[in-house]
Image (cartoon, rainbow, N blue to C red):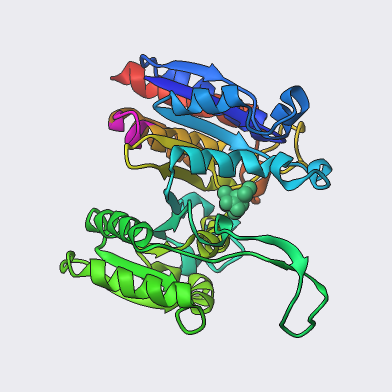
Amino acid sequence: MKIAVLPGDGIGTEIVAEAVKVLEALDLAFEMETALVGGAAYEAHGHPLPESTLKLAMASDAVLFGAVGDWKYDKLDRPLRPEQAILGLRKHMGLFANFRPAICYPELVGASSLKPEVIAGLDILIIRELTGDIYFGQPRGRRTAVDGHFPGAEEAFDTMRYSKPEIERIAHVAFQAARKRNKKVTSVDKANVLETFQFWKDVVTEVHAQYPDVELEHMYVDNAAMQLVRAPKKFDVVVTGNMFGDILSDEASMLTGSIGMLPSASLNTRNQGLYEPSHGSAPDIAGKGIANPLATILSAAMMLRFSLNQADAAARIEAAVAHVLASGLRTVDIWSEGTTKVGTREMGDAVVKAITKTITKG
Ligand code: IPM
Ligand code: MG
C-alpha cells in the first residue's frame, strides 16, 4: 500500500505532519512518500502540480492532502495558481465522488455559533459531485459581448453542464451511501431556474427507481442553505453538484463547531482516493502552530477505511479523537470556557497517545 503525502501550503504542512504521526503510530505496513503541491510546488518547480507530483499521486492507493493557496499567488495566471493543483488532481484521477460528513461531537456542541438543540447529535453526509459542473465546463473565458444588456462591453463567462452518466454515477453513490445510514437522500438543485439542474433532478429521480428502499426528496439550493441552519438534523445524505456542494459543505462545517473538524474523501471508480480537510490553507494562521489538525487526522481515518481496507485502524483513530475531545483538549477554533487550549502539535500528540493506549490495551 502506498500513500502520497501532499502537505501543500499554509497550515497544510503543520496539520499533515500530525496526521502522518498518527498513521505511523498505528504500525501498519504502508509506504508514505511526500511531494510538493500548490504554491510550494510553484516556488520550487514553476508549476502548482508538477508532473512528478501527479505521477506519484496516480501511482498511489491514496493521497493524503493538506491545503493549497495563498493570497500572494492571486495575481498569477489562473493555470499557475495553487488551486489548480487540487482541481488538476481531481480531474486527472477522476475523483468524482466527494464525501463530506458533518458530525457534531457532543463535546463541541458549545463551539458552534448555533443553538445546542439545533446541532446536538447531528450526523449528516454531504456528497458533492467533484469533476463536473461550472468548475470544469467549457467554454469559459473573457470576450467582448455581442448581446446581453451591454453589447460591445467586456464580459466573462463560464459553462454549467452535466452529462447524464455523470449525474447517474453520483446518484448511485448517494443512494448506496444512504442504504448504510438512515435511507434518506436529499438531492439539491436549482431546477426552478437552471436547465442543468432540471436535468439533474430528472436523472436523480430516474436512478431512484432502483432504490425503492431509500426515500428521495428534492430541494432547491437556496432552501437547502436555509434548512441546513434551521433544522439540519432532518437531513441524512445530501447529494448535489460541484458548486452547490462547495458552498453547502462550508456552511455545514459550522454545524460541527468548526471547519477545523471537517474531513473529506474524494473517490474515483477504482476506490483510489484523495483525503483532505474541507478547510483551506488559512495563510493568516500559518506557521503559528495553532491550527486544528483533527480534520486532517479524521481524513486519514477515512483514507484507511475507503481506500486501504483498514476499517479497524480507521475506527481506532476516530475513537482516539473522541477520547481527546472528551478529555477537554481544544485548539483555539473549538476552545470554550473550562477546556484546555492546546496547539497543533499537542493535539496531534494527544491523539497519538490515545491510540498507543488502545493498542497496548489490545
Ligand atoms: C474545496 C475548496 C476548493 C473548491 C478550492 C480550493 C479550489 O474550496 O475543496 O471546497 O472550490 O473545490
Ligand atoms: Mg470549498
Query: Where does the N terminus fall, quadrant-wise?
Result: top left
Total of numbered circles in the picture?
0
Q: Position of residue 21 (x, y in %)?
A: 53, 21
Task: From the viewer's side, name the closer residue of 205 and 298.
Answer: 205
Quarter where residue 151 is shown = bottom right
Residue 334 shows in the view: no
Can residue 60 be found in the magenta stretch?
A: no
Q: Is residue 31 left or right of residue 271?
A: right
Indicate the quadrant where residue 115 lies. Answer: bottom right
Q: Position of residue 25 (x, y in %)?
A: 45, 18
Q: Residue 134, relative to residue 345: is it above or below?
A: below
The location of residue 165, given as percent across then percent down, is 33, 58
- The quarter of the image that holds ligand 2 is bottom right
Give above or below for 243 relative to 71: below
Q: Residue at x 73, y 39 (%)?
A: 80
Q: Which residues are magenta?
A: 304-311
Using the image as rendered, state which of residue 85 and residue 100 is in the foreground.
85
Left or right: 125 in relation to 48: left
Q: Residue at x 55, y 59 (%)?
A: 137
Residue 93: percent from left, percent from top: 45, 37
Residue lying at 36% horizontally and 24% vertically, measured from the top left: 358
Is residue 192 at all visible to an observer of this figure? yes
Instruction: Work out which quarter of the rendered image holds the C terminus and state it.
Output: top left
Q: Nearer the viewer, residue 145 or 200?
A: 145
State whether residue 145 is above or below residue 340: below
Q: Is residue 181 left or right of residue 122?
A: left
Which residue lies at the image location 50% right of the left edge and 50% below the top edge? 107
Judge left or right: residue 182 versus residue 134.
Answer: left
